[in-house]
Every structure is written in structure tokens, then in C-alpha cells.
């Protein structure tokens, strides 16, 4: 019995030893596997980070990484698929709202003229925002007719008027006015007219001023397309004059003479836009510029304002004002659009008929400086007292017209000055003004100028009608004076009326 008990104890001890041995071995194996797995994961993670960092540094390849990372991301992507699909509708709505906002901004930009001339980048942005090019406008038929006869200067519906701010003063932009059948575009580079659309006798709208497609081109313009020119428009002989006993030398930019204010006259500077109302009863835009003392050689600081306004039915008013701050100075501003009533791309203007109500003119020397004489137009090629084709009187003129007329009627009073008709298109333009003179220029010096819509302008492609004081009046006491004293205001008014004749 004792032997059996001892044998049973030995069996139990052996069994217990085997169990303990197996358990210990399993525990070691599990720990070994866990350690191996941990080491392997650590190695993969480090390799993945190294590859991604290396890819970013070399070629910014965000897809660089281990296959393990990609598999991990696949599971994550599955978890978010439903959430993403649920967001698509909201995202689409946001995109639609953004597009609507962009269209609204585009319209506001065109109406308010906000923009800058960052060369090609600006042009790209303008097209992206929905700006219309002039060639698109040529196809638009303007059918709206407004018969408002109110000509007051104060606008009674100016709640939509935009006041300029300091941030805009150095920006170069595109602006527009619209009323009835007239649509006019401007740039504040030179306070210039870029285009003027008016329908022909068939109702088709056309652009009747020469110019360029982009605002940028006006910065390199050499022929003053649509510009406000000054401080003294036209020519100053020998680029000098005397005022109050002192001799002033101005910048010569036309041989030995000064033309349209010098190398950087008012047509070659950025004007501030202080008011702008795109449409309504009296659409208008106000440009301002301060010319400093000594600007191009002229004495004294001069504050200048040019206001364009669409009034009545198919009429454009232009008012130029200037006030010297503390010194007397000559002032003679002029508007320099090139008109072609057949359309800016219609060829020459020689068949257009014109009447100029000026019985005298100021003869010039070989440099186009007035001799000081005032001669009658009767019996000369300059006689347009009766309406007649421009080409009729040009036989003896090699380069066409570029002459100042001494206008009939009293200066400082508005009166009719010019009537211009293009029978082919049926368009008619009448010009009234309050200045003593008119420079009639038929564009004889235009040559190979790349204009709107690929048009190349040649001689006689357009004509200028520049109401003004007489050229070189600062050196000729017999001519009406151009001198404006401090505290006095210079005011120059023009009115262009457009209509259709049968």
C-alpha cells in the first residue's frame, strides 16, 4: 500500500513538471513573437517616414511612401466614403453660390471700375471675371431709349453712386456709362474715352472712336487716343513763355516745341476716380488730378477735374475744370478722341461731311506754330462754313487738316461749333462748346497703329475736334489769354449730341 502511494506521488510530480514546462515555453514564444512584431512595425514606420520626407524634399511627391501606408489609408477612405458623398450636395451648392458671387463681382467691377493694371495678369483676371471686350460690344444692339430731358448737374438718384477712395488712386481701371442708345467706356489713364457705342440707321450698334482693346495699351500710346490733354493742350513755341516777368521753360516733346503738356502731360498720368454712377437718370464719372508745382516746367500746383455725364437722350457732356493753388499758370485743356462715325474700323473719314462754324483761322509755320495772324477762311481750303465732304477741300493739303479755327460767337458761352455726318451709317454728331478755338485734325500722321479688334489704323482713320484756346497763346498777347490766377476757376464745357439722319 505504501508502495502504491509513493508511485502515485511520483506520477503526479512528473505530470506537474510537464505542465509547468509547456506553460513556460508558450510564454517565451508569445513574448518572442510580440517583440519581433514590435521591432518589425517600428522598422516599417521609420522607413515610411524617411521615404515621404525624401520625396517631399526632392520633388514634392506627396504620394511617396510605403505600401503599408497606402493599405492603411484605403481602410480609412472606406470609413469616410459615405460622409464625403453626403457632403457633395452642400459643396455643389457652395460652388454655385460662389459662381453667382463671381458674376456679381464682375458686374460690379465693370460698373465701379475697380481693378489694377498688372499687365497680363490683370487681363487674364478680367476675362476670368467676365469682362466683355470691345469686339463683343460691336455685336450688341442698343435698343433702350431714355427720353429724360433733365440737364441739372445735381443727380437726384445718386444712391448707387460710387465714391472713389485713396486705395483706387494708383489703380488703372476700366469704367462704363450707359444711357439709352449710348454706351461709353473710359480708363482713368489720361481720363480717356476708350469706346463710344451708338447705333447706325439700321439699329446696329458700333464703336465710333479709335482706340485700343486693353487699358494697358493706353500707357504706351503716342497719339493721345481719347485722352484729356494739358496742362496746356496744343503747342507752345520753343518750349518757353514769360509770366509775370519770369521766364519758364517747358519740356520739349515736339521738336523744339512743347505739345499737349510735355512728355508726361495729363494724358499720360493716372487720374483718381472720385465719383462714378454707371446708369440711371444721369450716369456720370468724375476724374481728378493734382499737377504739382513745376510739373513739365509749368508754375504752381493745379487741381483738375474732368466730369463725363450722359444727359438727355444720346448726349455726352464733358466739363473740365481747373484751379491754381497759389501761382498764376497757363491752362488749356482739350479732349482728344478720334471720331469715325462709320465705325472705328470703317476706313477713312474723308467722305464724312462737316460744318465748322469758324469764320477765321490761325495760319501756322512749318512747325505748326501759329504765326500770330488771324485770317478769314473764305476762299481757302479751311472753309467749312457750309456742310460739305472733308475730301472736297483737301486737294491742296498734303497731310490733311491740323489747324485752329477762331470760332464764331462769344467765347465762354455755349454755342454750336461743329456738325458731322456720315451718310453711309446715318450717324450724325453735333458739338457745342464754350471755348474760343477748335483744332480740326484729320489724323494725317496716323500710320500702322494697332487698334481694337486687330484693326490697323492708317492716315485719316479718324478726326479730332479739340475745343481749346488758341495754340501758343502764352507767347502771343493778341490771342485770348490762357492765364488763370489763384482763386479763379478755369471751366471748359463740351456737349456731343448723337442722332440719326435719313
Image (cartoon, grey):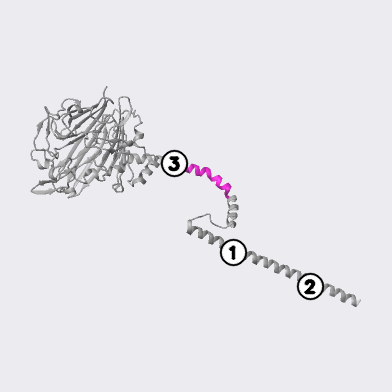
Helix, strand or loop for disc 3: helix
The quarter of the picture where residue 384 lies is top left
Taking the image as shown, residue 29 lies to the left or right of residue 85, namely right
Query: Between 106 and 450, which is closer to the camera in this rendering?
Result: 450
Judge left or right: residue 91 versus residue 424: right
- As measured in the structure, the alpha-carbon distance from the residue carrying label 3 to the one carrying label 2 is 81 Å
Judging from the image, what secondary structure is the residue with disc 1 in? helix
Residues drawn in magenta: 80-100
Q: Secondary structure at mark 2?
A: helix
- Image quarter of the N terminus: bottom right
Distance between mark 1 and mark 3 Cα atoms: 49 Å
Q: How many marks?
A: 3
Q: Main secondary structure of the magenta part?
A: helix
248 sits left or right of 169 in the view: left
Sequence-first tag of 3 and 2: 2
Name the residue beneath numbered marker 1.
Answer: 43
Q: Quadrant of residue 463?
A: top left
Disc sitting over residue 17 in the figure? 2
Amino acid at each position: 500500500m505504501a508502495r502504491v502511494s509513493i508511485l502515485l506521488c511520483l506520477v503526479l510530480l512528473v505530470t506537474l513538471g510537464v505542465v509547468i514546462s509547456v506553460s513556460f515555453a508558450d510564454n517565451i514564444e508569445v513574448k518572442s513573437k510580440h517583440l519581433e512584431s514590435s521591432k518589425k512595425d517600428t522598422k516599417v514606420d521609420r522607413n515610411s517616414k524617411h521615404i515621404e520626407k525624401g520625396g517631399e524634399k526632392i520633388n514634392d511627391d506627396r504620394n511617396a511612401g510605403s505600401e503599408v501606408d497606402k493599405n492603411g489609408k484605403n481602410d480609412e477612405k472606406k470609413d469616410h466614403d459615405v460622409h464625403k458623398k453626403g457632403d457633395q450636395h452642400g459643396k455643389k451648392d457652395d460652388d454655385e453660390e460662389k459662381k453667382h458671387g463671381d458674376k456679381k463681382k464682375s458686374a460690379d467691377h465693370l460698373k465701379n471700375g475697380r481693378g489694377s493694371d498688372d499687365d497680363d495678369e490683370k487681363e487674364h483676371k478680367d476675362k476670368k471675371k467676365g469682362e466683355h471686350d470691345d469686339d463683343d460690344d460691336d455685336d450688341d444692339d442698343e435698343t433702350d431709349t431714355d427720353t429724360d430731358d433733365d440737364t441739372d448737374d445735381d443727380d437726384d438718384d445718386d444712391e448707387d453712386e460710387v465714391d472713389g477712395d485713396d486705395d483706387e488712386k494708383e489703380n488703372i481701371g476700366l469704367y462704363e456709362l450707359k444711357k439709352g442708345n449710348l454706351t461709353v467706356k473710359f480708363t482713368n489713364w489720361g481720363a480717356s474715352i476708350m469706346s463710344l457705342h451708338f447705333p447706325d440707321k439700321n439699329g446696329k450698334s458700333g464703336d465710333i472712336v479709335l482706340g485700343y482693346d486693353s487699358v494697358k495699351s493706353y500707357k504706351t500710346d503716342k497719339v493721345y487716343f481719347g485722352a484729356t490733354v494739358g496742362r496746356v493742350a496744343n503747342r507752345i513755341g520753343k518750349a518757353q513763355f514769360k509770366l509775370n516777368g519770369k521766364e519758364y521753360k517747358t519740356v520739349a516733346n515736339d521738336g523744339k516745341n512743347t505739345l499737349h503738356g510735355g512728355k508726361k502731360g495729363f494724358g499720360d498720368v493716372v487720374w483718381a476716380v472720385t465719383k462714378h454712377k454707371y446708369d440711371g437718370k444721369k450716369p456720370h464719372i468724375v476724374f481728378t488730378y493734382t499737377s504739382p508745382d513745376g510739373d513739365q516746367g509749368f508754375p504752381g500746383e493745379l487741381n483738375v477735374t474732368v466730369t463725363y455725364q450722359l444727359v438727355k437722350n444720346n448726349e455726352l457732356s464733358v466739363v473740365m475744370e481747373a484751379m491754381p493753388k497759389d501761382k498764376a499758370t497757363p491752362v488749356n485743356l482739350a479732349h482728344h478722341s478720334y471720331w469715325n462715325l462709320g465705325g472705328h474700323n470703317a476706313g477713312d473719314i474723308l467722305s464724312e461731311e462737316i460744318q465748322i462754324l469758324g469764320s477765321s483761322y490761325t495760319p501756322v509755320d512749318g512747325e505748326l506754330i501759329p504765326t500770330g495772324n488771324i485770317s478769314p477762311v473764305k476762299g481757302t481750303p479751311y472753309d467749312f462754313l457750309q456742310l460739305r465732304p472733308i475730301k472736297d477741300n483737301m486737294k491742296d493739303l498734303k497731310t490733311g487738316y491740323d489747324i485752329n479755327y477762331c470760332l464764331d460767337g462769344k467765347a465762354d458761352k455755349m454755342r454750336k461749333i461743329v456738325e458731322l455726318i456720315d451718310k453711309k451709317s446715318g450717324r450724325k454728331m453735333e458739338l457745342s462748346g464754350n471755348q474760343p478755338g477748335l483744332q480740326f485734325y484729320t489724323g494725317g500722321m496716323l500710320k500702322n497703329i494697332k487698334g481694337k479688334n486687330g484693326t490697323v489704323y492708317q492716315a485719316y482713320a479718324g478726326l479730332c475736334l479739340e475745343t481749346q484756346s488758341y495754340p501758343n497763346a502764352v507767347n502771343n498777347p493778341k490771342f485770348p489769354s490762357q492765364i488763370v490766377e489763384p482763386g479763379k476757376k478755369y471751366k471748359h464745357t463740351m456737349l456731343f449730341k448723337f442722332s440719326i439722319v435719313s
